[in-house]
Image (cartoon, helix red, strand yellow):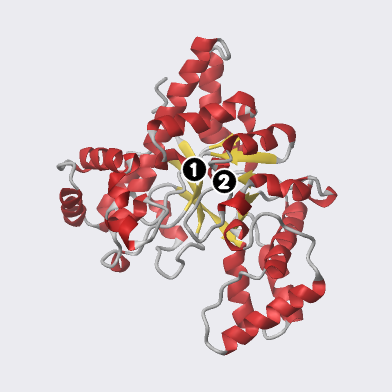
Amino acid sequence: MDLSGIPIIDQHAHNLLRPEHTRAFAYPSAFTEGYAIEVVTHHVQETLFFRRSMREIAELLGCEPRLEAILEAREQLGFEQLARRCFEASGFQAILMDDGFMPDQVMPTGWHNRFARTYRLLRVEFLAEQLILQTPTWSAFEEAFRSALDLPASEVVGFKTIVAYRTGLAIEIPDPEAVRSAFASLRQQAAQGARLRLAHKPLNDWVVWRTLEAAAQQGRPVQFHTGFGDPDLDLRWANPLHLRPLLEHPGFQRVPFVLLHASYPYTREVGYLAAVYPHVHVDLGLAIPFLSHFGMAFVVRAFLEFTPISKILFSTDAHLIPELFYLGARWGRRILGEVLAATVEDGDLTAAEAEKAAEAILRRNAQTLYHLE
């Protein structure tokens, strides 16, 4: 199936790196979740994703499929022209951006509107860290955090949590005394000039709990990082099955949970959750395009084994460089087209149903869930 005519709503991505920060940025590091020097300088270049991507980027830029030639072509094009070429070849209708990743080094979210309509996702751990620095007491922080979540839909269309990275997805009912103690500890670190990092489980659980309460009142989706990521994450605690108590909590039944990255390698597990819980949705980003051709097809097939089409969302999880937006869009359409064509051959869908499924996954489901124009 040729899906090139369907505009994409990228329901989870990140901002591009500012030009002045690209000099110190190792280009291969954009193609791996690892950051050890041996991985970035050598091993990533031995992955199927990197080798496939070099050929496709070279074709887009009109140069030889070598890293050095690609770097030279990027330099000649310049930052904005490179971004424009990648985005024009991608065909986005809209992009939802989590701007809490490397916030001091990336372009403003609004800047990306020149390429596609851009909406903001609020990363709640980054918000909490900012407010801890600004508020001297727990009561002041609590009030400031609650207030900061109450933003108009024109400013924020959803919330994002990376609690999986910090203390895991086994989120518990916050204990008030433990939460205050964690806050006091972080305030003391801040007073001593230490880099602030929200990694105290009681406080992390409180942040997620309060976010879900706000989302329940406002009807906003909450995106959860699940599954694989960089080595800062303990993969055992990124299994989405840990979220079951939250999914069944009476106060959160109306909160749309968006579980990111196909929860790879827990893909079938997360597909099951979306199949049996009405407020759970799944996402293909990062798995597409970081996996092999076979791996990308696997996650789409695994979802379609059991997960309702209406629950599957597309994203690129692109970050820092515009090429990842292009590769995500290119392979999202291609893999989805191949797998849906196979469902027609197998008799699971008619050709007309497969076309509707493609549009639902690439754009309509996100448009409905986030109430986009």
Q: Residue at x 15, y 49 (%)?
A: 69
Tell me the CA gap for discs 2 and 1: 7 Å
Q: Residue at x 69, y 60 (%)?
A: 208
Seen in the image, is 81 located left or right of residue 313?
left
For marks 2 and 1, the one nearer the N-term is 2
Seen in the image, is 153 located left or right of residue 202?
left
The residue that disc 1 covers is 285
Depth check: 51 or 318 in front? 51
Q: Which three-letter amino acid code belongs to the residue tagged 2?
A: Leu
In the rendered image, residue 112, in percent from the top left (x then y), is placed at: 41, 54
Residue at the farthest right position: 250
Quadrant assignment, res 259: top right
Q: Which quadrant holds the N terminus? A: top left
In the rendered image, residue 171, in percent from the top left (x then y), is placed at: 72, 57
Tell whether label 1 touches label 2 (CB within 8 Å).
yes
In the rendered image, residue 13, in percent from the top left (x then y), is placed at: 47, 50
In the rendered image, residue 359, in percent from the top left (x then y), is placed at: 52, 28
Binning the other alpha carbons within 10 Å of mark 1 as few (below 14), some (14 to 19) or many (20 upward) gives many
Q: How many marks?
A: 2
The circle drawn on residue 324 is none
Depth check: 314 or 89 in front? 314
Q: Inspect this view and state whether residue 309 appears.
A: yes
Q: Residue at x 81, y 72 (%)?
A: 176
The circle drawn on residue 260 is 2
Regarding mark 1 in the picture, which secondary structure is present there? strand
